[in-house]
Image (cartoon, rainbow, N blue to C red):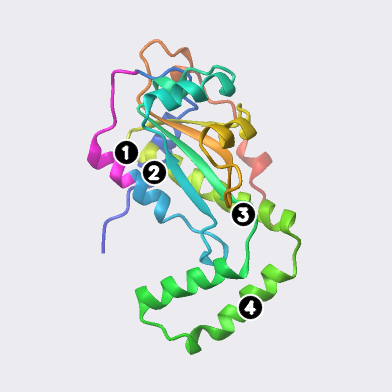
Amino acid sequence: MSQPISPAVLRERLQWRYATKQFDSKQQIPADVWQALEDALVLAPSSFGLQPWQFLVVDDKALRAQLRPVSWNQPQITDASKLVVFLGLRTTAVGDVDRLLARIGKVRGATTQSLDSYRQMMISFVQGRPAPELGAWNARQVYIALGQFMASAALLGVDTCPMEGFDPAAYDRILGLEGSPYRTLCVCAAGYRAAEDKYALAPKVRFAKDEVVVHR
């Protein structure tokens, strides 16, 4: 069994991270570190395990230059080592349920019959809700993955900046997502902070623990 990190290390890494405003465009995330962060995305939890997402890593510099003007001209879009666009399914259908079950069968060797009750439960959930509600539910799953990505990055010493300051419709158009099952929900830049980023050393502003963590 692997040795967990200490509580002190966890607190230190979460204190260290912040929404990086200025990235050092000359510093690139090493390939092995980035692969670990992609694995963190793949391993993110989701309700029913349906994984209603895709994570679009935009490496093309010209494409990122197109995205910057529709992102309030924020420099993180072009300056960060990596840019991940978090996509969510617009809705969920029976086909998405069967896709998951096929994967379960392949990975775990489970038979179709053994998964039938699980299938019926998921189908009942999906068919019992309108498409917009399912789309909103999918979005919430995507934000779970965003949180896991950011926490994992902090543990590996990689800076991140989650972003909603952009035009989602323009992203969908530029990235060729119009008419696809997926839509843009949020963006996260990743890399290494610039030395001149004044926010790096600014104290975190959080409400007191006893105000936000309630015990009953």
- Residue 138's disc is 3
Marks 4/1 in contact by CB < 8 Å: the verdict is no
Q: Residue furthest bottom?
A: 113
Q: Nearer the viewer, mark 3 or mark 1?
A: 3
The amino acid on which the numbered mark 2 sits, given as a three-letter code, is Ser
Between the residue at mark 4 and the residue at mark 2, the CA separation in whole angstroms equals 32 Å
Q: Nearer the viewer, mark 4 or mark 2?
A: 4
Q: Residue shown at 36%/32% (left/top)? A: 59
Q: Quadrant of residue 4?
A: bottom left
Q: Earlier in the sequence, mark 2 or mark 3?
A: 3
Category of crowding for the residue at label 1, using alpha-carbon neighbours closer than 10 angstroms: few (below 14), some (14–19), many (at least 20): some
Where does label 4 land, which residue?
A: 121
Of 174 and 148, the residue lying toward us = 174
Q: Is residue 63 above or below residue 132?
A: above
- Is residue 34 in the magenta section? yes
Classify the position of the C terminus by image quarter.
Answer: bottom right
